[in-house]
Image: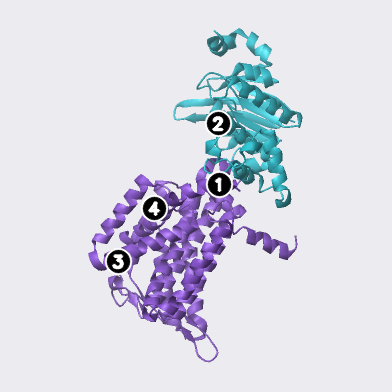
Chain colours: A purple, B cyan
Amino acid sequence: MSSASRFTSILKLIEGPQTLGKGPKFWSGFTVVLLAACAYPAFADSYDVGNNVYFFNWLFMAMGLSLIWGYGGALSFGQTAFFGVAGYAYGVLTINLGDAYGLTLLSLVLAVGLSALFAAILGYFLFFGRISGVFLGIVTLSVTLVLERFMAQTAGPEWAIGKARLNGFNGMGAMPSLTIPWPGGNIVLYPDVTLYYVTLALLLVCYLGLRILVNSRFGNVIVAIRENPMRAEMLGYDVRKYQLATFVIGSALAGLSGVLYTSWGNYITPASMGMTAASLPIVWVAVGGRTDLTTTIIGTLAVLMVFQSLTIYGSQYALIVMGTLLVITVLIAPRGIVIALISPFMRRKSKLEGER
Amino acid sequence: MAILETRQLNKHFGGLHVTGNVDFALQPGEMHCLIGPNGAGKSTFFKLILGEHLPDSGAILYDGEEITRAKPFERIRKGISVKFQVPGIFKELSVQQNLTIALQHHVAPEILQEEIDRLLEFLKLSQDRKQLAGNLSHGQKQWLEIGMAVALKPRLLLLDEPTAGMTPDETFATGEMLQELNREGMTLLAVEHDMAFVRQIAHQVTVLHFGKIFAQGTIDEITADERVAAIYLGEVDA
């Protein structure tokens, strides 16, 4: 196969059995939403635009959880652990290396790489130890809580890596924002319009890349493992390797969220790995519909926005609402509210046109 | 040389010996049925061959090569395939996708669809390719799983009660399917309760009782054996 036709066949995987959105209607809608997202900064105050990058920051972690849990069937409670590891790593690296010469970008890569390495080590013991189901949730939750406890007690001056003080419960701050080296002056990605576009572009790349991944042969195997791991193994697949690879990719996406969040707010605290933080991603992706990347994104954005407004007006009650929302989802629409809303339409459509 | 051989195979759970010193050999091209009363150790014997359980002692050889401690997926890659008793299909995925997953790692992408069509035809599931596997009838699910097992082009196919829950017509059709596979050179080993089905397909029958090989022979020899009738067939046929 020539490299051009290989490229086309890879591009074709952007649609497939593992993603709901397909056909001209979906892509028209997709383009409209994307154009609206691109146009938004023109109609809004740049301060608000910068603030709202906050919502985008979490979507990488949500897509990672959709991959691990929704597609792969392994409920990881540990997304925040990788978020925190990468966030702190970015802080330590950039405080020590500074923001010149694109070193913040190198730090981003290293921090995400570190969270992936951590996921690979943890995942090795989990999946090669054949830990699954609820135990996987328990172990991953424990790991994130241990990390939170550990970071919370690093207040003393002895807890410093180079110039970077870990600062215990108060969290680590004052790390430089991501900075793109540019002829005629570095572009510093403060929470502003430029950061908005960079994050949006990154989001688009990850979303489309993941669509290709889940519709590829690899994606076929991970959904097969979700459906019936024993059957998948008895078709000759080394299930453990696929599970580990999925876990590492999904966790690295959580790491990417961690870096973007830390760079956006120049701040990271142990609470980002705590019980509340660990449970929220579960709510986001469960409510939207974890078995599809698009519904995961819609659900996550919707829940985050509701949560944000509730936090402003109702403070701690917002968490109770989140809990209730999860319970309602599990009881009424276990596959996710967005999926439940669109499925009657999908069924009618598939009757009319015939499924692919 | 036997395609599958077990030597002095032992497995116990606590004090319970489920297979005791099983010496078993399966010749290439054979259709062999494993029968025996409930609790005779048939399923455990299958799980030992597949590597779901590891034996306490003894050896398993596939094509002369020892596979006693090999991982299940390694055994599959050597040419063994299995159809489980409870259909082990991917319920939330379409029939087409189920077969794709079974075929994709050894069939080139250009001929994948052709292979899927051929299998669907063989399984009488051409009309149901877009259906979610979970929506198929019980018999069709069993066929789909046979198809997935066969998709690997195994030399040895293990079938754990392939006709469980099927109507007599479906059972007969399944027998014909398996005979066709056998004519193409596949060796088959099936655990089965349905004696009509055993009569339809088996060249050789092995009776397991309390984890030991109790009798071996053709179906006529086995049914004529009064000792077997006493432990098993008698109860069933009476």
Res B150 visible: yes
Indicate the amino acid at tag 3: Ser
Amino acid type of the residue that numbered disc 1 sits on in the rendered structure: Ser
Q: Are marks 4 and 1 in contact (CB under 8 Å)?
A: no
Q: Are marks 4 and 2 in contact (CB under 8 Å)?
A: no
Give the mark nearer the N terminus: 4 vs 1.
Answer: 4
Task: From the viewer's perspective, tell me whether residue B209 is left or right of residue A149.
Answer: right
Callout 4 environment at 10 Å: few (<14), some (14 to 19), or many (20+)? some
- Confirm whether circles 3 and 1 share one chain: yes
The Cα atoms of the two marked residues, 4 and 1, are separated by: 41 Å
Give the alpha-carbon distance from disc 4 to disc 2, as whole Å. 39 Å
The spot of residue A325 in percent (x, y) is 32, 53
Mark 4 lies on residue: A139
Q: Give the residue displayed 26% in from the left and 56% down from the top.
A: A320
Label 3: how many Cα within 10 Å (few below 14, some 14–19, many 20+)? few
Chain at tag 3: A
Q: Is residue B231 above or below residue A281?
A: above
| Label 2: which secondary element | loop
Task: Indicate whether B46 appears above or below A55.
Answer: above
Residue at 39 percent across and 53 percent down: it is A139
The reply to whether the C-beta atoms of the residues labelled 3 and 1 are less than 8 Å apart is: no
* Residue tagged 2: B137
User: Label 3, label 1: how many angstroms apart (C-alpha)?
Assistant: 37 Å
